[in-house]
Amino acid sequence: MKTIGKTFYSVCFLVVILSLLAARSIAAEPNGSHTRVRLVGDDLSAWQGDTGDWQVAGEVFIRPDNEKLLAAKPGAGIIWNGPKGKTEHLTTKAEFGDVRAHIEFLLCEDSNSGVYFAGQYELQIFDNWQTRSFHAGIECGGIYQRWDPERKPKGFEGHSPRVDASFPSGAWQAFDVVFRAARFDLNGRKTANAKFVKVFHNGILIHENVELSGPTRGSMFAEERPRGPLRFQGNHGPVAYRNVWVAPIDEPDFFVFGYALRDAGIATKEQGKLLRELGYDGMGHVGYEGLAEVVQELDRNGLRMFSIYVRAQLDEGKPKYSPGLKEAIQILAGRDAMLIVTINSRKYKPSETAGDDKAVKIIREISDMAAANGVRVALYSHYNFWMGRYEDSVRMAEKVDRKNVGAVFSLCHWLREDDRDMRPFLEKSIDHLFAVVIHGADHKGGRKELIQLLGNGNYDVYPLFQKLKELGYSGPFGLLHYRVEGNIRESLTQAMKVWRDITKRLRAEMNHTDPE
């Protein structure tokens, strides 16, 4: 009866499967700053060492006489683990850190495999269609559990998918994944956990921003590393793979900060399309107006809403913050977004510590609302505001003492105070740094001189990038484009070119090679 049911549903789902795979393949296209590495083709040259019984084929299907084994026809484009369905694991020659990945797979009934990202963190592949889970993370699309023989129970921190998006055995399925590797500073100290940023299974979002405190069971390495190969399990049952590619994400996220597109007259429905075309990872937003529509537009283009800009007020008789904040936070729920919070006052002078106690209460109130929805609070110093210097933002983050509260380093407001050596301040505050706002600038001047198009001005921004790389900073960079003159498409194109040149130069320094 189980076989009949699966056969029936396989036929019913065929059209849905094909359409979903096609849709996700398009949605998972990496943006213009990332290059695909294809891992399945005409041979096994992408894989290292003993590949055992793994073979290349043109077609793979469940054997008519045995639904628990696979058979194949000659050709190319598919790899499978042989007629016995049990052989060596398959491990890439190349190593990767942050990646976008697309993986299509086919299973027999009751079969089991898995993909280890960076060789350490397993995304489970399992024929569990319409069956009960044994433990969290064993399901198809689950993030497999960690393992400690001294613990009771020994397995822990498995993550089940939000929903069961599996298809029946014998049907091709797909994962689309954005993975962030663990971060380490120059002394080898881990500064950020590895994270499955997004996992889609057959077009359905099943994981978002799942942090991994350590390697899952079966990791290639006992200790975590910032890079490693992709490893496909081959000894747990028959499995086939096709159309497998990864796109290394060698640079941090780069988004457009604030109202640049709106002020340039770009309609909401066109903003995501433009940003994706130019290679940006998303955008920030100012205030709450139109937030839901902008988020929907970014979603349609596979981009991210990084932040909204919020003003808070210390003075009595004035609202602490806009009453629409709670609803805005709910729109951002689960998106790994930030509230960029700036604080002003007429009663207290800029940087006057007498306002600290009031500010702590307000920030904690905002923090509690944000934390309940998975949103962070990043304190933004603004010249001539009460929280006017970067040191003020860091001081308040330390006093608030909440995990979801940190600070933003804004280049223009730093330069507006004076052209100090920023490096010692960054060293002291790196654990609180959530975002960095950049642009082109001169060393001195007013708004027009201190906020220019990235690449313009006589201030060299590259040492800032070098220092942040040295400190292990892994957060996003926001491009400030406030009142920068010129055509918005041309300006954002130039800024992206400068960004890519900077990240290429940093990569070359890290790898001790010449920039291409």
Image (spheres, rainbow, N blue to C red):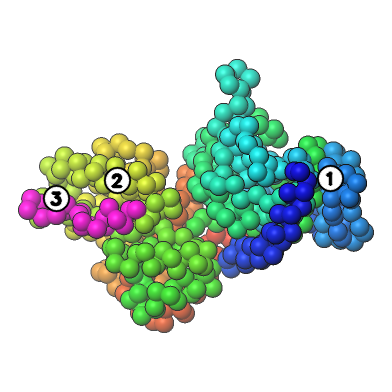
Residue 315 included in the magenta stretch of the image: yes
Residue 67: mark in rendering: 1
How packed is label 2: few (under 14 Cα within 10 Å), some, or many (20 or more)?
some
Residue 82 included in the magenta stretch of the image: no
At mark 1, the secondary structure is: strand
At mark 2, the secondary structure is: helix
* Left or right: 223 as drawn, with respect to 400: right
Which region is colored magenta?
A: 310-330
* Image position of 168 with respect to 500: above or below: above
Mark 3 vs mark 1: give the one in front: 1
* Image position of 276 with respect to 422: above or below: below
Q: Earlier in the sequence, mark 3 or mark 1?
A: 1
Going 28% across and 63% down the picture, which residue do you hit?
287
Residue 314: mark in rendering: 3
Residue 369: mark in rendering: 2
Going 29% across and 46% down the picture, which residue do you hit?
369
